[in-house]
Amino acid sequence: MISDRKLEHLLICENYDVSFKNKTNGFEDIELIHNVLPEIDKQEIDLSTSTFGKKLDSPLFITAITGGHPAAKEINKQLAIAAENNNIALGVGSQRAACEHPELEDTYTVVRENAPNCLLVGNIGAPQLNLAEKAVEILDADILAIHLNPLQESIQPEGDLDARGYLDLISQITNSVNIPIIAKETGCGISAESAEALVEAGVDFIDIEGAGGTSWAAVETYRAEDRYLGEIFWDWGIPTAVSTVEVTNAIDVPVISSGGIRSGLEAAKAIALGADAVGMALPFLKNSTSQEQLNKFISRFNESLRIAMFLVGASNIDELKESKLVIRGKTREWLNERGINTKNYSRR
Ligand code: FNR
């Protein structure tokens, strides 16, 4: 049953090592250029963004984590209170279980109850076209995310393996729902070509969810009877820094960079590469044990982003997006192979 699967995902992510083994998010290859004369007041640096429809105090999304099991209710409540108090965006996990089992609805309605003003992001899979409106209504969502996760489905014992017609389904969802739509991966990233197709289908925002953080092949490996396939594909995917450059070069819609982002410094690099915001999932789950933990985590993130902005002389997110940077190593190799001129970033 879906609800049991949701609990297993939480328990595995909380208790086992689900990180990529030999692949990183690629941000170690990105160097912002130190400015010894920032000529700005650090105290006045503005982290806010209004790109996603509501003003956020920091360009930070708590990306989809949970819901659909009684154990998820308390986690969603804690995340909602923290998101509301810090005025950041919050996504919930797949709403399929609650749309099909009304007794699980309160694991999602608890979010709006505790975050009346927050930018909330609902979540469904592309095949759940018929559940889209219901998902938006249950959450009182501002944005609906459609997750795309062919690797997870391949390793998951009960996976959805017929991926034909997804673009058509996505295009139907964008037409049937009257709020903006995010297309997101879950840890394998999105290529330039896929991003172009998604935007063509009417998607309003792209959430990268690249490789280098939580590996969903890993999560499903712990659930599988035979670990063989999961072990082989554990590290599959486009590193987040690479995917961020591919996507922001290919399309003009706002982009959330995510998948293994763990600090404000990595966030600054992602935004300088062209993202409009960043997202994190696993660190928020791990810090959801108390408001104190969550507030500390968010304020540390904000402070490390602010220091990075000070050190490049960027007083707001738009200026950070224009900051010069150098792309090195494997990330440059990949991007050059794909026809992207990495010098454009160092000589802006
Ligand atoms: C997730 N993620 C996720 N994504 C989604 O679109 N629908 C979902 O239901 C879930 N469920 C879920 C449960 C748990 C426990 C975690 C930790 C994550 C994926 C998540 O949004 C994100 O894409 C990846 O986890 C990669 O980001 P991090 O964890 O490396 O920051």
Image (cartoon, rainbow, N blue to C red):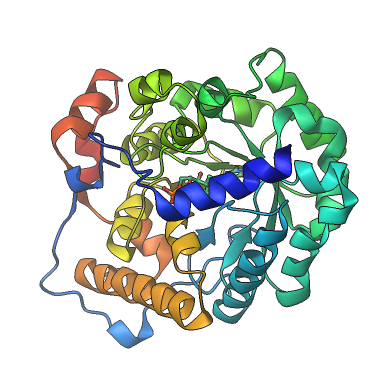
Residue 328, visible in the rendered structure: yes
Q: In which quarter of the image is residue 221?
A: top left
**Rendered position, 38 above or below 146:** below
Q: Which of 121 and 331 is in front in this view?
A: 121
**Count the marks: how many?**
0
Residue at left offset 69%, top offset 21%: 167
Residue 301 position, x and y percent, is 36, 70
Identify whether 272 is placed above or below 229: below
| x 65%, y 69%: residue | 74
Q: Image quadrant for the N terminus?
A: top right
Name the spot of residue 265 as percent of width and height, x first. 28, 62
Query: Which residue occupies 51% across, 38% down?
Result: 186
Give the residue furthest to the front. 225
Q: Is residue 53 left or right of residue 258?
A: right
In this view, which residue lies farthest toward the left? 36
| Residue at position x 39%, y 31% in the image | 246
**In the image, residue 102 lies at what x, y percent?**
89, 51
Q: Nearer the viewer, residue 204 or 92?
A: 92
